[in-house]
Amino acid sequence: MNARILVTGGAGFIGSAYVRHLLAPEASGGTAVTVLDRLTYAGSLSRIDAVRDHADLTFVQGDVCDASLVNALAAQHDQIVHFAAESHVDRSIADGGAFTRTNVLGTQVLLDAALRHDVRTFVHVSTDEVYGSLSHGAAREGDPLRPTSPYAASKAASDLIALAHHHTHGLDVRVTRCSNNFGPRQHPEKLIPRFLACLLSGDDVPLYGDGRHVRDWLHVDDHVRAVELVRRSGRPGEIYNIGGGTSLPNLELTHRLLELCGAGPDRIAHVPNRKGHDRRYAVDHTKITAELGYRPRADFATALADTVEWYKRHADWWGPLFAST
Ligand code: NAD
């Protein structure tokens, strides 16, 4: 075995794509993977169906805040890749407590266990939202953090606490900060699947404010390839931005989704803006390109059309989740 990797949040949208990537038939093999996931409303074992019977996969249902469980697991692993989080901004506005608990305290529990059990590498998956809203340009890794939502603040706290464990204790921590992910199997609370679920169910799409909020879009497969580059070849104590290279105002994205679903602009319902809605995020990913050779492979138009097709074919997957949002 080359590595024993503990993947937290491996039943979530991105963590599951990472687990499928690690255990894909074309992967080099020799990697034992344990998924630790609490299976909150956001987690689903169906996302890792394709690898559930893989001999090198173990699934543990549990909480990253459970110190005795996390210590027992850390003792059996060389590396931790930490995706588990409360991840939806709107929920953090309604009730921030779960975000501080899981994202901040849960990360602390994992870092303590990593130190205690000499875990070799700790990859912490953070977000571009820690930089806050930018009026122009793109955030570099050394830029100050100005998170605004309770979600982004909890991610910034955990991101800095992780880096502090490198600085103070010499733990090999590597932090990634990625932009907005999209692709199949994303929970229909997030913008693209939510709008698709609305359109495919005959509802209007609820667009916040004037729709001029700008996001960079990153296909989930590009993201997990980048995380894997960081795990294998990144440097201890370093931060790596991961962008997708397609920056769009939400209104333009909405028009593309409408077109792909054969719907007209009359299906847009303008709703009051999200509280504290950040205007624009953008990350500069030249560092990970120069150091680790990362380049997003997905062509945005094609990847978006493929994502729409997946949601058209999998109403059985997203339907019950959409009904419960
Ligand atoms: P997700 O909400 O789809 O999945 C989160 C997973 O974590 C779920 O499987 C859930 O069951 C699990 N989880 C939640 N609380 C837990 C706990 N206390 N203990 C154990 N497991 C727990 O999230 P995602 O979109 O896959 O995001 C993964 C990571 O990437 C997060 O850290 C998020 O902050 C970050 N990120 C996401 C995006 C995006 O566009 N989705 C962008 C930037 C950064």
Image: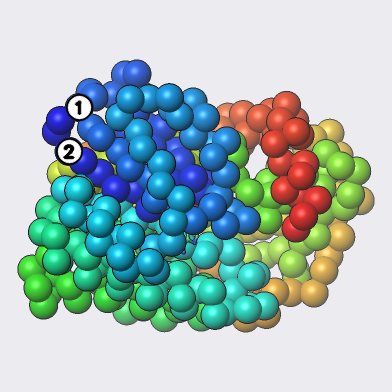
- Kindly identify the residue that appears in the image at 58 percent across and 29 percent down: 302
- Residue at image mark 1: 30
Residue 232 relative to residue 154: left or right: left
Is residue 233 placed above or below 240 in the rendered structure?
above
Earlier sequence position, callout 2 versus callout 1: 2
Please tell me whether mark 2 sits on a helix, a strand or a loop: strand
Q: Quadrant of residue 175?
A: bottom left
Task: Look at label 1 and name its amino acid.
Answer: Gly
- Kindly identify the residue that appears in the image at 39 percent across and 51 percent down: 36
Where does the image place residue 272, in percent across and percent down from the top left?
80, 74
Please state, as top left, top right, bottom left or bottom right, where the C terminus lies in the image.
Answer: bottom right
- Kindly identify the residue that appears in the image at 63 percent across and 65 percent down: 213
Q: Quadrant of residue 257?
A: top right
237 and 254: which is toward the camera? 237
Where does the image place residue 85, in percent across and percent down from the top left?
46, 62
**How packed is label 2: few (under 14 Cα within 10 Å), some, or many (20 or more)?**
some
Circles 2 and 1: CB atoms closer than 8 Å: yes
Farthest residue in the top direction?
Answer: 25
299 and 34: which is toward the camera? 34
Task: Look at label 2 and name its amino acid.
Answer: Ala
- For residue 3, the mark is 2
Tell me how far mark 2 sits from mark 1, CA to CA.
7 Å
